[in-house]
């Protein structure tokens, strides 16, 4: 029996950016199902409420049957077990991202060797886009529309 390839794409997605969208769109052919999972990060205070982030991502992928959107407040590796995921999907923008993500992937592998981490490199034009910078632009009243998926207006959610 062939096992269904289920990937969890974890993050705070505060907000969900074009970089996140790019990783998802490029990974659709790799997995049977992708769960975009908004995790509670013990070191971060969210800019947008959880429900708003869930609604935005659900709206964005409402017509994509391979994608589910969920949230969790435990270890990502435990969430993977709960939902039957055998892959963790992560995007890498820089070498610093790689070092950070490599360490987490290796610890996750020690905790559950049934879950493999898959890294996708960000496309060059999206390398500078990250949620932290987008939030900073928002805090100062700047226009972030070019960094958000097409058709997403944060005020609509």
Image (cartoon, helix red, strand yellow):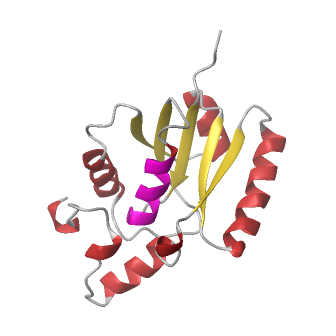
Please determine whether, in this image, residue 146 is positioned above or below residue 71. Answer: below
Q: Quadrant of the C terminus?
A: bottom left
Q: Residue 145: image x %, image y %?
A: 26, 74
Q: Position of residue 40 (x, y in %)?
A: 51, 55
Q: Position of residue 42 (x, y in %)?
A: 58, 62
Magenta residue span = 15-26
Q: Most prominent secondary structure in the magenta stretch?
A: helix
Q: From what the image shows, is residue 146 above or below residue 59? A: below
Q: Closest to the observer: 16 or 1?
A: 1
Residue depicted at 41% across the width and 56% down the height = 21
Left or right, 139 with reference to 66: left
Q: Is residue 66 magenta?
A: no
Q: Is residue 72 visible?
A: yes
Query: Is residue 14 at all visible to an observer of this figure?
Result: no
Q: Quadrant where the N terminus lies?
A: top right
Q: How many marks overall?
A: 0
**Would you say 26 lies left or right of 119 here?**
left
| Residue shown at 67% from the left, 69% from the top | 97
Residue 146 falls in which quadrant of the image?
bottom left
Q: Residue at x 42, y 41 (%)?
A: 70
Q: Residue at x 44, y 60 (%)?
A: 13
Q: Is residue 23 magenta?
A: yes
Q: Position of residue 3 (x, y in %)?
A: 63, 19
4 vs 114: above or below: above
């Amino acid at each position: 029996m062939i096992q269904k390839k289920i990937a969890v794409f974890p993050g705070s997605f505060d907000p969900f950016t074009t970089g996140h969208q790019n990783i998802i769109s490029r990974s659709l052919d790799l997995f049977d199902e992708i769960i975009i999972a908004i995790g509670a990060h013990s070191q971060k205070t969210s800019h947008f409420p959880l429900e708003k982030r869930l609604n935005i991502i659900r709206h964005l992928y409402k017509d994509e049957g391979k994608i589910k959107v969920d949230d969790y407040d435990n270890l990502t590796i435990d969430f993977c077990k709960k939902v039957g995921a055998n892959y963790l999907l992560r995007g890498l923008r820089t070498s610093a991202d790689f070092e950070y993500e490599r360490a987490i992937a290796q610890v996750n592998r020690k905790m559950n060797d049934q879950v493999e981490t898959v890294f996708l490199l960000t496309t060059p034009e999206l390398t500078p886009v990250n949620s932290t910078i987008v939030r900073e632009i928002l805090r100062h009243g700047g226009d972030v529309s070019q960094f958000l998926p097409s058709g997403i207006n944060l005020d609509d959610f």
